[in-house]
Amino acid sequence: MSELPEHIEALPPLKPVPRLLEGQAALVTGGSSGIGKAVALALGAAGADVAVNYVGRAASAEAVAGQIRSGGTRAIAVQGDVSKEEDVVRVVGEAVAAFGTIDILIANAGLQRDALVADMSLADWQKVIDVNLTGQFLCAQAAVKEFRRRGRRPQVSRALGKIICMSSVHDVIPWAGHANYAASKGGVMLMMKSLAQELAPERIRVNSICPGAIRTPINTEAWETPEAYAALKTLIPAKRIGEPDDIARVAVWLASDEADYIYGINLYVDGGMTLYPGFEGGG
Ligand code: NAI
Ligand code: BGC
């Protein structure tokens, strides 16, 4: 992520990532920036091989893969649009060709195309649904097929496979001016829970991480000026924006056998954004 602006406090460093994922292979969609990049790096640091998917920024994805390799595990950058079925099948195939299989899917790729309802083009509605919702479906479908093809490896993980959907607090918090985005994330919630119910008997664990405001390129205007950041903090009981590593550490744990009995949850990682902070002094 870009340099920390002066108006955002620096946080004390975290301890090294625990090696919870040795011998496993992961695919991270949208892994060249923001949350996906941090998750890909943390999975690598946890001992996993990582396929870093990107749609348009090859050099950034190659840099992430190179950083993972320098930590001692395998990594490749794989181009592909998650909203296109043939791309998703190819991306998963390239990861399997490189690592033998995948054990973990982080369905992270996503975007915003914001507009008030009367101004929202059908193209912008459809684009957000295609990438944020259909893209997660296509990636989950391809991952499930690979988990079944590969079969159990109890020495590597108790689960046959793990799917983590990158959802949002906006799977439950309505968001005026962002109807397409909130609809896509609300859809992810029930898609995730339905897949979790369907696949749990095979010990495929499907869960969502629901970030609050995390400092990435998707929401620069919400934190880049002191005024915007002050307004954002009124929505966050913890009174700080999240950093991509806040999500990455949770993803490592949720993908690991430390979380082996967790099926079909929405894990909010949001500094309390879902606690209705408007009621701090009212109601
Ligand atoms: P970002 O813009 O840095 O990352 C999104 C990534 O998805 C980019 O690398 C982009 O190139 C990629 N992408 C977009 N369309 C794609 C496609 N068709 N195929 C493959 N990749 C594609 O933003 P950020 O914040 O890291 O977003 C990651 C995920 O986290 C998204 O799903 C977003 O909705 C979610 N999220 C982000 C929050 C935040 O505050 N930053 C909060 C809640 C959820
Ligand atoms: C959005 C961000 C926003 C955050 C909190 C995320 O899903 O992508 O733009 O800052 O939710 O509202």
Image (cartoon, grey):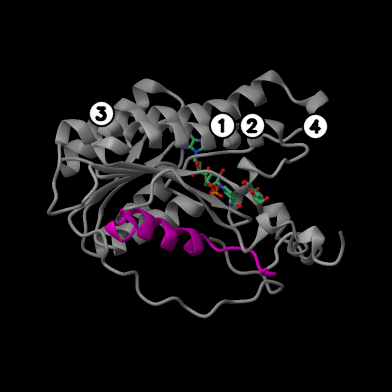
Residue placed under numbered mark 1 in the picture: 187
| x then y, percent, for residue 209 | 49, 50
Kindly check if marks 2 and 3 are in contact, taking CB atoms under 8 A apart as contact: no
**SS at badge 4:** loop
Out of 94 and 208, give the one closest to the viewer.
208
Residue nearest the observer in this picture, 12 or 254: 254
Residue highlighted by disc 2: 183
Where 98 falls versus 230 (above or below)? above
Kind of residue at badge 2: Ala
Label 1: element kind: helix
| Residue 247 vertical position relative to residue 141 in the rendered view, above or below | below
Dot label at residue 268: none
Q: CA distance from mark 2 to mark 3?
A: 27 Å
Amino acid found under the numbered disc labelled 1: Gly
Q: Earlier in the sequence, mark 2 or mark 4?
A: 4
Is 241 part of what is drawn in magenta? yes
Q: Main secondary structure of the magenta part?
A: helix
Q: Would you identify the image quadrant in which residue 149 lies?
A: top left
Answer with left or right where residue 190 lies relative to residue 42: right
Q: CA distance from mark 1 to mark 2?
A: 6 Å
Judging by the rendered image, the residue that carries numbered circle 4 is 116
* Disc 1 + disc 2, Cβ < 8 Å: yes
User: Disc 3 marks which amino acid?
Assistant: Lys
Q: Earlier in the sequence, mark 2 or mark 3?
A: 3
Q: Are marks 2 and 4 in contact (CB under 8 Å)?
A: no
